[in-house]
Image: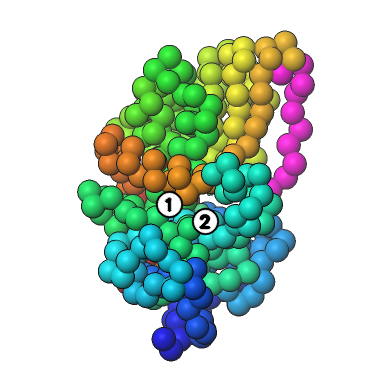
Amino acid sequence: MGSINGFAAHAAGAELLPYKYSPGDLKAHEVEIQITHCGVCHSDIHLINNDWGFSEYPFIPGHEIVGSISAVGADVKSLTAGQRVGVGWQSGSCGWCEWCLQGKENLCAKSQGTCVHRNGGYANTVRVDARFVIPLPAKLDSENAAPLLCGGITVYNPLRTHGVNPSSRVGVVGIGGLGHLAIQFARAFGADVTAFSTSASKEAEALELGAHNFVNTRETKGLKALAGSFDFILSTTNADQDWSAYIIALRPTGTLCFVGAPQKPATLPIFPLISGQKSITGSPIGSPLLLREMLDVAVRHGVHAKTERFAMAKVNDAITRVKKNQVRYRAVLAN
Ligand code: NAP
Ligand code: ZN
């Protein structure tokens, strides 16, 4: 094919501009996807801003991609032209290490991001290693499926891996793209769910999404009153919070898990970890196998991203709303 057209960041924090690149010949292990939808994850904003220090410009962000396959590499046997598929954060791994062989490609040291040092999904087309291209269940509509491919799997993986079940009391910190999906998956696992939010205006929707309780964390006494209450707290926020209050809010043997990454290193109280045998951990996206499972669970339990749709050319408007924490709850770009 000729060139691929998209919208690229050319400098840290700058508005995206139309951008064209030539992908060359389709590699034998790749497929080419005509993009219909792409979610705007906060990780795209971190990459555009170079918050993590490794962005290389220009690049096209976007890693919650849905579209249909338009070309199939010579060695790809599992996918066919015309098939509707999705791609999330990860688009490559070595395939041979201990972690890849276990089906935990998301832990591979050579993991490659879909829009890290390469061009992603704010475009008309993308090419991706077929191992990371996931067929979509027919019952999911494309706009709704896009946010599941990064946001959905990122919250599903730790809830599933840490054994959340009907006896669990779960807290979700930050009710944005990830957080609003975490409420729904935790509820699907049967847990009692509390939403922690800095936005009082999200209370009614958090309860509609399945939360049993809502705590406005701008009011400090709300969190303090919950000391010793939770088995599992999942933090999706990228802002600093009173982490010691969340550790104190855990029951003995409880776990505080970070999927959102605050900029500053945290100072944490150790004594409650010792006395309550509590754990602190983090979690990166999820494997291709778990992505398939997560999509199936989303269909069967009606987990549904609430989206705001923008035309691809309006990408800068979408980014502005994400930065201002105005989106309810995931912006999705559509071609
Ligand atoms: P998002 O849609 O922007 O939501 C983030 C939420 O954090 C906001 O809705 C808000 O919730 C809360 N928040 C924002 N600013 C805040 C502030 N100043 N103080 C307190 N709370 C604030 O972002 P997202 O797409 O869900 O991503 C969240 C984080 O997860 C990002 O850092 C992203 O890079 C990371 N992430 C990690 C992985 C992984 O594999 N671990 C994967 C994807 C994304 P309330 O209004 O409810 O307070
Ligand atoms: Zn993401």
Give the residue at mark 1: 149
Would you say 144 lies left or right of 120 here? left
* Residue 27, magenta (yes or no): no
State the colouring used for the structure image.
rainbow
Q: Amino acid at mark 1?
A: Leu
Type of amino acid at the residue the image marks with label 2: Trp
Residue range of the region highlighted in magenta in the rendering: 262-273
Indicate the quadrant where residue 175 lies. top left
- Check disc 1 and report its element: helix, strand or loop: loop
Disc 2 CB within 8 Å of nearest ligand 2 atom? yes
Residue identifier under label 2: 89
Question: Tag 2, which secondary structure?
Answer: loop
Q: Was residue 272 drawn as part of the magenta stretch in this picture?
A: yes
Side (left or right) of 82 relative to 170: left
Which residue is at a point 46% across and 24% down the rendered structure image?
164
Q: Residues within 10 Å of mark 1 (few under 14, many from 20)?
A: many
User: Residue 190 versus residue 12: which sits nearer the camera?
Assistant: 190
User: Which residue occupies the foreground of this view, 77 or 63?
Assistant: 77
* Prevailing secondary structure class for the magenta stretch in the rendered image: loop
Q: Is the CB–ligand 2 distance for label 1 below 8 Å?
A: no
Furthest-bottom residue in view? 2
Report how far apart the C-alphas of labels 1 and 2 lie in the structure: 8 Å
Q: Looking at the picture, how far across and down is residue 92, in whole percent? A: 57, 60
Residues at discs 1 and 2 in contact (Cβ within 8 Å): yes
Q: In the rendered view of the protein, which quadrant contains the N terminus?
A: bottom left
Residue 299 makes an appearance in the image: yes
